[in-house]
Amino acid sequence: MADVNRNLWAPWRMEFIRGLGEEQAERGCFLCDYWTHPERDAEHHVVWRTASAFVVMNRFPYTNGHLLIAPASHQGDYEHLSETELLDLQRLTRDAVRLLRETVKAQGFNVGVNLGHCAGAGLPDHMHVHVVPRWNGDTNYMAVLGDTRVIPDGLDSLYLTLTEKVKTLGIANE
Ligand SMILES: [Zn+2]
């Protein structure tokens, strides 16, 4: 993720960083919250789930289509995950890449995990894989978007596109 941090400056993420302490104190872990409320998947932008892991859109994306893949269990590191969870994380990562190629026409990806605060983890106690779609020339992203925050409408509309494509590709049934 170091390359992402260097190349893509997403100023709306400051809201995320500033609000994080507050939000976590109030609501506990948002990934656990999402996992335990499947009836609110659309509101939370959970794209699909397996028995032990799930894929959710990052509310504060580096790029359009930035997905997070998390195990169901609240664990901060690989060593505490079950074999099933490890395999599911890998499978979901593979499928997330495929999904983003098919939908937002991504030409490349940054796939990575930040373990620990010092490595940039915003939620160090519940590990998650970032899948950030990239396009040729997208390091000029800032020049295009300026300081415009990604608007919720944009996330909602992309969510519909992603969930429809998941059905078409048969990803969620694997
Ligand atoms: Zn958690």
Image (cartoon, rainbow, N blue to C red):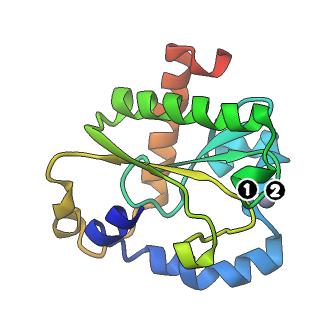
Cα separation, mark 2 vs mark 1, equals: 8 Å
Q: Nearer the viewer, residue 62 or 26?
A: 62
Q: Is residue 148 above or below residue 110?
A: below
Image quadrant in which the N terminus is located: bottom left
Contact flag, marks 2 and 1 (Cβ < 8 Å): yes
Q: Residues within 10 Å of mark 1 (few under 14, many from 20)?
A: many
Res 52 → quadrant: top right
Q: Is residue 36 above or below residue 124?
A: above
The residue drawn where x is 30% and y is 66% is 8
Q: Amino acid at mark 1?
A: Leu
Q: Nearer the viewer, residue 140 or 157?
A: 140
Q: Quadrant of ligand 1?
A: bottom right
Res 127 → quadrant: bottom right
The verdict on label 1 being within 8 Å of ligand 1 is: yes
Looking at marks 2 and 1 on the same chain, the residue that comes earlier in the sequence is marked by 1
User: Mark 2 — residue?
Assistant: 74
The residue drawn where x is 54% and y is 36% is 93
Residue 33 seen in this snapshot: no
Residue 129 seen in this snapshot: yes
User: Mark 1 — residue?
Assistant: 31
Total residue callouts: 2
Q: Is residue 123 above or below residue 21?
A: above
The verdict on label 2 being within 8 Å of ligand 1 is: yes
* Element assignment for label 1: helix
The residue drawn where x is 61% and y is 77% is 117
Q: Which mark is residue 80?
A: none
Q: Where does residue 167 sit, x and y in percent of width and height? A: 56, 18
Q: Amino acid at mark 2?
A: His
Q: Where does residue 51 sit, x and y in percent of width and height? A: 80, 30
* Element assignment for label 2: loop
